[in-house]
Amino acid sequence: MTAVLVVCFAGLGLAALLVLVRLVRGPSVPDRIVALDVLVQLVVAGIAVAAAVTRDGIYLSVLVAVSLLGFVGTVSVGRFIERRGA
Amino acid sequence: MSPLDLLSAALMLTGVAFAVIAGIGLVRLPDLFSRMHAATKPTTLGLALVLLGAALRSETGGDAVKLLLVGAFTFLTAPVGAHVLGRSAYRAGTGGLEGLVVDELRDEDRPDRQDP
């Protein structure tokens, strides 16, 4: 299972790096929000993989909170842009 | 490794592969709306696969329920988030509107916009 953990984290890290490229390059605010949204989902996936490999369920409540917080953040910034313009 | 573990590992690896595809699409695609297409669909499916794989390995039923709950939340919230973001980007006029081939919202939503 350790090999699975390593490969999964390598893949998630690669995806996070690519997302960070988009986060830095922008060019508009919605682009960055999309990137942050994907980053939150990558974090959720990483916590799930770690919990599955170690068979330790202690972080799973964090998972629920992080995924919902990511959604609230995306929607609130989206509304903010709509009113103010990007 | 039991067969269940193998299935779980295969699901998680497939989900991670989808996450990598989403990352590549996010960097490579040309404008906001096509990037959102890359960002929402593969990550939702990839996250669902990872959560399913993790749920197969959880020791108690409560852990599996929490993981599946996160998956259900994602399936509910990802389309809503993408919709809000796409609408606000469209109304704000950013994100490569000149790349659109068909723009059915132009007349009712942005009357000031010219034909491309």
Image (spheres, coloured by chain):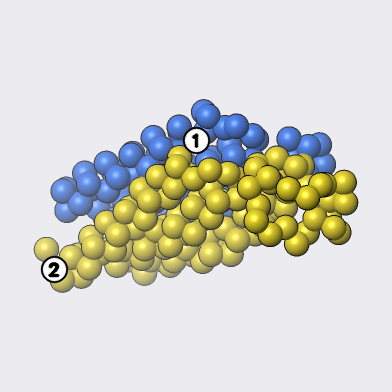
Q: Amino acid at mark 1?
A: Arg
What is the quadrant of the N terminus of chain B in the image?
bottom left
Residue drawn at the location 18% of the way across and 65% of the way down: B6
Which chain contains the residue that carries disc 2?
A: B
Q: Position of residue A66 (x, y in %)?
A: 52, 47
Q: Is residue A80 visible?
A: no
Q: Position of residue A45 (x, y in %)?
A: 39, 51
Q: Which residue is mark 1?
A: A22
**Pointer 1 chain:** A
Q: Nearer the viewer, residue B108 or A50?
A: B108
Position of residue B64 in the picture relative to residue B29 (left or right): left
Per the rendering, the mark at residue B2 is: 2
At 39% from the left and 58% from the top, the residue drawn is B46
| Count of marks, rendered view | 2
In the picture, which chain is blue?
A
Q: Nearer the viewer, residue B27 or A59?
A: B27
The hue in which chain B appears in the rendered picture of the protein? yellow
